[in-house]
């Protein structure tokens, strides 16, 4: 279920890095399936934005020693 937009919007940076790293390690088929689940109740235009964000976070974590 999608959020209501009324929460505090706090993000745990450690958890975000864990999720992004796992995202980068998923096979393409599993990544597509997960993206469908994550964006199921969102307007279609947000899918690409979310996917690009997760890719950038995963890439920046991979580049950090």
Image (cartoon, rainbow, N blue to C red):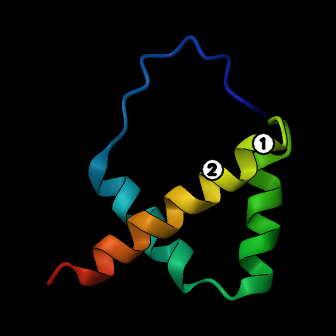
| 14, 28: nearer the viewer | 28
Q: Which residue is mark 1?
A: 45
Q: Is residue 26 above or below residue 56?
A: below
Q: Which residue is mark 2?
A: 49
Q: Position of residue 34 (x, y in %)?
A: 74, 65
Q: Is residue 27 above or below residue 12?
A: below
User: For the point 30% across and 73% down, which residue is it?
Assistant: 61
What is the spatial separation of the Cα atoms under label 1 and label 2, in whole angstroms? 7 Å
Q: Is residue 13 above or below residue 29?
A: above
User: For the point 39% across and 76% down, which residue is it?
Assistant: 59
Residue 3 picture quarter: top right
Q: Position of residue 17 (x, y in %)?
A: 35, 62
Q: Position of residue 16 (x, y in %)?
A: 39, 55
> Which numbered tag is attached to residue 54?
none
Badge 1: few (under 14), some or many (20 or more) residues near its Cα, within 10 Å?
few
Residue 48 picture quarter: bottom right
- For mark 1, give the secondary structure: helix
* Discs 1, 2 touching: Cβ within 8 Å: yes
User: For the point 62% across and 83% down, which residue is it?
Assistant: 26
User: For the point 37% across and 29% down, which residue is it?
Assistant: 10
43 displayed left or right of 3: right
35 displayed left or right of 64: right
- For mark 2, give the secondary structure: helix
Q: Position of residue 32 (x, y in %)?
A: 79, 72
Quarter containing the C terminus: bottom left
């Amino acid at each position: 279920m999608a959020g209501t937009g009324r929460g505090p919007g706090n993000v745990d940076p450690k958890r975000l890095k864990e999720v992004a790293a796992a995202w980068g390690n998923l096979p393409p088929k599993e990544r597509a399936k997960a993206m469908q689940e994550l964006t199921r109740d969102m307007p279609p235009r947000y899918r690409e934005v979310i996917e690009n964000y997760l890719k950038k976070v995963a890439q920046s974590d991979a580049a950090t020693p």
